[in-house]
């Protein structure tokens, strides 16, 4: 029986291996450029940090304490989660707004009674809305969550437990955080008990206190707007008085227009105060450390 001849294959030139590696690296590089087709300072900075860390021989691990190099807020990068937030916003139309900011995703609660007057006690409706939003943003992100409390310009009563509107706004922000870490966490524990016992959900990780930063904004913003309104009001009244003094309008016209200007000014004041009776929840781009 004749022996089969062995196939002698020609060896691949060494330069071809180097060329293949170069083409692969070029392809990777151009894919990276394509992914950065919309360049933002934050995204560019993330790439620089990632390359720097990798070149130092200490590439980041996806298992390191929930940290991420993603520049985008995590809820924006998860369409399903973002859609759920939009659904909740639609359910409470006019009371919830969601905006993408440079520092993260901002959720604002406004146009309804969030707290009892001059206090940090959450209303039942506020708890209901925060509960629905919190379950989504807390359990589907590992990002830092800032909660910002506000107060309007009106001084507190002498018997108030808060020395100033700064204290009141800080207490309001802290109340929201405390609600998330106590009442909401307890409710979610009951609802997700099966997942917790099976190890599929670590409730203490997602509801860790070091994720939350309560911030009191005081009455600074509302006072800025009210000061601008007052300047416009004074200008309109001054102009009206000059028109009357120069005989351009009659006394009856002067009184009518002054009443209209004053009424509009008072309405603007109330609308401005109402606008700043709010709570802001900022899901930061940063994640907490390990």
Image: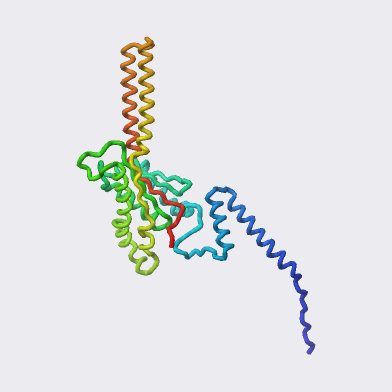
Q: Is residue 144 visible?
A: yes
Nearer the observer, 245 or 271? 245
Q: Hey, which residue is sitting farthest left in the picture?
A: 159
Nearer the observer, 6 or 199? 199
x, y percentage for residue 273? Answer: 32, 36
Query: How many numbered markers are drawn?
Result: 0
x, y percentage for residue 33? Answer: 62, 53
Q: Is residue 92 visible?
A: no
Q: Is residue 144 above or below residue 109?
A: below
x, y percentage for residue 54? Answer: 57, 62
Q: Is residue 223 above or below residue 44?
A: above
Q: Identify the residue at image location x=47%, y=64%.
A: 64
Q: Assign the C terminus to one quadrant of the image.
A: bottom left
Q: Is residue 22 above or below residue 3?
A: above
x, y percentage for residue 172? Answer: 30, 47
Q: Identify the residue at image location x=54%, y=65%.
A: 58
Way the structure is coloured: rainbow
Q: Identify the residue at image location x=49%, y=63%.
A: 62
* Horizontal side of residue 126 vs 33, given as left or right: left
Nearer the observer, 237 or 257? 237
Q: Hey, which residue is sitting farthest bottom in the picture?
A: 1
Q: Assign the N terminus to one quadrant of the image.
A: bottom right
Q: Quadrant of residue 240?
A: top left
* Horizontal side of residue 37 vs 95, given as left or right: right
Q: Identify the residue at image location x=35%, y=42%.
A: 110
């Amino acid at each position: 029986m004749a022996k089969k001849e062995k196939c002698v294959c020609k060896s691949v030139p060494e330069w071809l291996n180097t060329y293949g590696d170069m083409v692969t690296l070029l392809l990777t590089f151009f894919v990276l450029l394509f992914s950065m087709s919309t360049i933002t300072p934050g995204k560019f900075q993330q790439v620089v940090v990632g390359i720097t860390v990798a070149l130092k021989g200490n590439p980041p691990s996806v298992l390191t304490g929930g940290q991420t190099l993603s520049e985008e807020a995590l809820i924006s990068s998860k369409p399903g989660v973002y859609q759920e937030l939009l659904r909740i916003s639609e359910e409470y139309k006019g009371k919830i707004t969601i905006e993408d900011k440079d520092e993260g995703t901002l959720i604002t609660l406004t146009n309804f009674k969030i707290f009892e007057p001059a206090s940090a006690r959450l209303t039942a409706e506020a708890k209901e809305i925060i509960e629905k939003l919190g379950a989504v943003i807390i359990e589907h992100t590992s990002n830092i969550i800032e909660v910002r409390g506000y107060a309007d310009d009106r001084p507190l009563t002498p018997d108030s437990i808060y020395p100033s509107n700064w204290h009141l706004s800080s207490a309001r922000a802290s109340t929201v955080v405390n609600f998330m870490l106590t009442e909401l966490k307890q409710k979610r524990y009951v609802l997700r008990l099966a997942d917790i016992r099976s190890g599929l959900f670590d409730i203490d990780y997602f509801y860790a206190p070091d994720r939350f930063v309560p911030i009191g904004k005081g009455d600074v913003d509302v006072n800025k707007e009210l000061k601008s309104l007052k300047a416009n009001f004074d200008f309109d009244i001054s102009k009206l008085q000059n028109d009357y003094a120069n005989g351009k309008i009659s006394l009856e016209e002067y009184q009518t227009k002054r009443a209209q200007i004053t009424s509009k000014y008072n309405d603007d004041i109330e609308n401005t105060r109402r606008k700043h009776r709010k709570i802001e929840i900022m899901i930061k781009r940063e994640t907490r450390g390990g």
